[in-house]
Image (cartoon, rainbow, N blue to C red):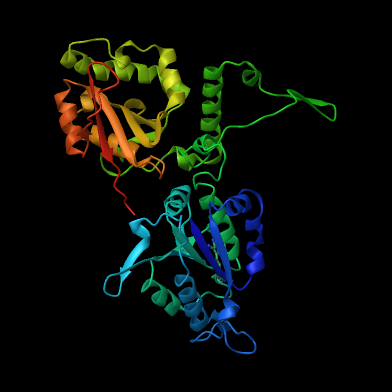
Amino acid sequence: MRLDVVTIFPDYLAPLDLSLIGKARREGLVDLHVHDLRDFTHDRHRTVDDTPFGGGAGMVMKPQPWAEALDHVLAQPLASGNVVDMASTRRTQEGLGYAVPRLIVPGPGGVPFSQALAHELAAEAWLAFACGRYEGLDERVYEHAAERMPVTVVSLGDYVLNGGEVAVLAMVEAIVRLVPGVVGNAESLVEESHEDGLLEYPVYTKPAVWDDRGTERPVPPILLSGNHCAIAQWRHQQRLERTAARRPDLLHPSATGGALAALDGRVATAADAPELLTLQRACWVDQGRANDTWDIPPLVETLDDVRAGLTAYTTWVWRSGGRLVASGRGRRAPDDPTTWEVARLMVAPDLQGTGLGRAIMEFVETRAPADVTTFWLNTGHRSERLIRMYKKAGYRLSAAPARHQGTVELTKKRRRTS
Ligand code: JD8
């Protein structure tokens, strides 16, 4: 990946020489260049700003230096080894085919930066960042740029900074650490906050009992138990409790409108397990009859199995008047993290046929991390009604033999919404 940053304070980007990003640059995983905007001025004072037309406080950044700086970046070679995906190759002026960067302009009025956007930008071969200062850039700079490359104004958050450099530091770190090979153990990227809608669990290291100036502080015993299933359950519970306490907005995902809007939806907790067991028993009786077998996981699982499922998947529950009436869950496929398993879609029998099932399926799809490219689900090979519904939703029967006897597997490529 190539990155170009234009700024009047190049030293502000010096931290990108350090730590993981510095190492990734030295290893050639990312090719980062910082350009001084003043190098694209031609007067003795290297002027980059002037007073605003229409009056008002502060100064505005002049268009000419920016135009020359961005044209200079555009003229840079996208070093070989940088995979040019067609997304970064823009045909301009009668079919000329050469790579152009995606330009990110930090600004308080931009689209919110997020982990999802970080994943999207990490997939680009070439990014450029324009760091503004003063009251911002002359608006015509955006017009000039948009005629040459895709431009996105992005905000780091709802507070005011003095310029774009700090935002670029944060964005570049969040993006580059997602580039394959930059973070040694990619596994650690999976369970992070904002990756799957839950905050991270608390972490501990030696000593097992810390003598904090006479105050003994032990590590939670579960973590010393060696019981990895119980540890995973405890950690998942901790993530739920922390998210509920600090970011309840993440737990109460805004329903995708439609059938779910009238219901009270949230991420499931262990307390929901008994009702989930009851609902799955009720929902899979028809599938048992349709497929002429009672040996279907939802019909044979124990309460502990349901609890374990709450750890292995992120599960959502919807209530009506306090009654658990619907649920669905999702997770990265254990053998392919870019595939998102949509599973255990349940609607109380008295509410089936109201479009809730489809709404839950679509909701679980929306919760897939940004780097997911494929949706996967399975059902009974004789569950014709469900198979029809999944096919109408764009799923196709998978050519690969189904993992579980008596089932069929269906997949669907993820369509990019933005
Ligand atoms: C770029 C100039 C300062 C902004 C007058 C203060 C991002 N989340 C964010 N907050 N602020 C910025 C940001 C601020 C910037 C520039 C980004 C360039 N300023 C201006 C408008 C009001 N001064 C940001 N990302």
Residue 107 sits above or below residue 170 on the image: below
Report the side of 131 relative to 298 (left or right): right
Residue most toward the bottom? 44
Tally of numbered tags: 0
Image quarter hosting the C terminus: bottom left
Q: Which residue shows up at 49% across the image and 83% down it? A: 64
Front residue of 258 and 19: 19
Quadrant of residue 101 within the rendered picture:
bottom left
One can see residue 354 in this view: no
One can see residue 20 in this view: yes
Q: Which residue shows up at 40% across the image and 17% down it? A: 274
Front residue of 37 and 152: 37
Q: Position of residue 316 (x, y in %)?
A: 38, 31
Ligand 1 is found in the corner quadrant, namely: bottom right
Q: Position of residue 44 (x, y in %)?
A: 64, 89
Q: Which residue shows up at 26% across the image and 26% down it? A: 378
Q: Position of residue 77 (x, y in %)?
A: 46, 66
Residue most toward the right? 214
Report the side of 51 relative to 303 (left or right): right
